[in-house]
Every structure is written in structure tokens, then in C-alpha cells.
Image (spheres, grey):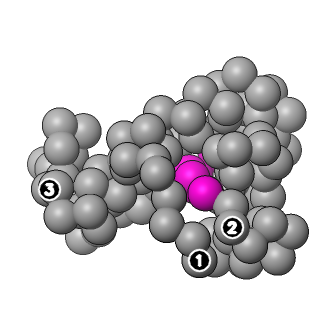
């Protein structure tokens, strides 16, 4: 895997923009609740009920792809215990930058 020149925030912004502008209308009605993984450089995407399966297919097509994933029709991709986290928040954690402002604790 190559080193990316994108920050986690840039990956999230590009992925969200591509999803909103090109992908949402195509996938939301038929695939709500599934994962979509977007190649932020090409706009190509994969949909699956399992995020890792979609990721593997995207990487099989373009091994050096910079990918962004989200759950179709949801504000967050994953729920961790009683906490809801967005993909951008998870990316910041991976980069060692902390959860960020969209980290919300459920009551």
C-alpha cells in the first residue's frame, strides 16, 4: 500500500463529496444500511453488507486506491458500545488525532 498525501480530513471530505454528488442517488434506495467504499481519486465505488468485502473488491481493481467508506443512509458507519462514531472520527483516531467534534455519546 502506498503512502497517501491526503490527510484524514481530506479523505473524508472528498469521500463525502463524491457520495453526495455522484453516488447517493444511485445506491440509497436499494442499499440502505449497507456499506459503500469510494475510491476518492476515481469516484469508483463498491457496495456490500460487509465493509471489508467492499474494500477488498475496490483494492483488487486498484491496489493503490485511497478509500473512504460509509454506511448508506446513516450518519455514522459504526456504533462502538454506547458511542456513535463517524468515519472521519475513526480516521482521526487512526492518525492519533482524537475523535473530533462529531463524536456523540448516546444517552
The percent position of residue 96, horizontal first and vertical second, equals 18, 64
- The crowding category of the residue bearing disc 1, from other C-alpha atoms within 10 Å (few below 14, some 14 to 19, many at least 20), is few
Q: Secondary structure at mark 2?
A: loop
Callout 2 crowding tier (Cα within 10 Å): few <14, some 14–19, many ≥20: some
Q: From the viewer's side, name the closer residue of 33 and 43.
A: 43
Q: Position of residue 56 (x, y in %)?
A: 73, 77
In the image, residue 71 lies in the stretch drawn in magenta: yes
> Which residue is depicted at the point 24% across and 70% down?
81
Q: Nearer the viewer, mark 2 or mark 3?
A: 2
Residue 32 visible from this viewpoint: no
List the residue tagged with mark 1. 1
Q: Secondary structure at mark 3?
A: loop
In contact (CB < 8 Å): disc 2 and disc 3: no
Label at residue 98: 3
Q: Does the residue at mark 1 contact the one at mark 3 (Cβ under 8 Å)? A: no
Q: Is residue 5 left or right of residue 101?
A: right
Quadrant assignment, res 43:
top right
Residue 57, position as x, y percentages in the image = 81, 73
> Which numbered disc, 1 or 3, marks the residue that appears first in the sequence?
1
Question: Residue 105 lies in magenta, yes or no?
Answer: no
Which residue is label 2 attached to?
A: 64
**Foreground tag (1 vs 3):** 1
Residue 44 locus on image (x, y percent): 81, 48
The reply to whether callout 1 and callout 2 are in contact (CB within 8 Å) is yes
Q: Report the predominant secondary structure element of the magenta stretch.
A: strand
Q: CA distance from mark 1 to mark 3?
A: 24 Å
- 55 on left or right of 84: right
Q: Is residue 70 visible?
A: yes
Label 1 and label 2: CA atoms lie apart by 6 Å
> Residue, x 65% and y 26% (percent of image)?
20
Q: Which residues are magenta?
A: 66-72
Amino acid at each position: 500500500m502506498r503512502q497517501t498525501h491526503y490527510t484524514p480530513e481530506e479523505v473524508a471530505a472528498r469521500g463525502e463529496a463524491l457520495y453526495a454528488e455522484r453516488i447517493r442517488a444511485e445506491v440509497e434506495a436499494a442499499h440502505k444500511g449497507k456499506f459503500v467504499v469510494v475510491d476518492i481519486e476515481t469516484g469508483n465505488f463498491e457496495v456490500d453488507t460487509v465493509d471489508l468485502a467492499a474494500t477488498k473488491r475496490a483494492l483488487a481493481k486498484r491496489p493503490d486506491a485511497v478509500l473512504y467508506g460509509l454506511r448508506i443512509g446513516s450518519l455514522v458507519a459504526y456504533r462502538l458500545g454506547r458511542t456513535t462514531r463517524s468515519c472521519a472520527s475513526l480516521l482521526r483516531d487512526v492518525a492519533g488525532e482524537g475523535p473530533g467534534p462529531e463524536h456523540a455519546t448516546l444517552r
